[in-house]
Image (tube, rainbow, N blue to C red):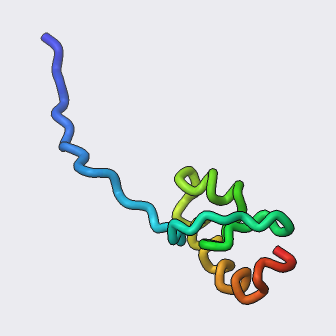
Amino acid sequence: MSSTVAQAPQGPPRSIATPCVKVCVVDGATSLCLGCWRTLSEIGGWSGFTDAERAAIMAELPAREARGGCGA
């Protein structure tokens, strides 16, 4: 006789914090989105990053915006 272990229902997936403001315009000179100030690789990899990685990027965004994307 095989034994089965009941698993608790998982429920809806946990939402991921994002700085996206749905204004997707990438600056050619800096490769930054002018809506959220992330790079294309950051945007593309966002859902795969850890919470700590996302938090580190989000902490940088105000400085990127203040510089207007220069020197990112």
| Number of numbered discs on residues | 0
Q: Residue furthest bottom?
A: 66
Taking depth in this image into account, of 7 and 27 the one nearest to the observer is 27
The residue sitting at 13% across, 10% down in the picture is 1
Tell me where residue 32 sits by quadrant.
bottom right
- Residue 48 appears at what percent x and percent y? 56, 50
Q: Is residue 28 above or below residue 44?
A: below
Taking depth in this image into account, of 50 and 36 the one nearest to the observer is 36
Tell me where residue 33 sits by quadrant.
bottom right
- Horizontal side, residue 71 vs residue 44: left or right: right
Taking depth in this image into account, of 58 and 24 the one nearest to the observer is 24
- Residue 52 appears at what percent x and percent y? 57, 67
The residue sitting at 86% across, 67% down in the picture is 29
Q: Is residue 65 above or below residue 24?
A: below
Q: Is residue 5 above or below residue 44?
A: above
Q: Is residue 13 above or below residue 20?
A: above
The residue sitting at 56% across, 68% down in the picture is 23
- Residue 34 appears at what percent x and percent y? 67, 73
Q: Residue furthest left?
A: 1
- Horizontal side, residue 3 vs residue 17: left or right: left
- Horizontal side, residue 21 vs residue 35: left or right: left
Tell me where residue 53 sits by quadrant.
bottom right
- Residue 13 appears at what percent x and percent y? 33, 51
Q: From the image, which quarter does the C terminus lie in?
A: bottom right
The residue sitting at 44% across, 61% down in the picture is 16
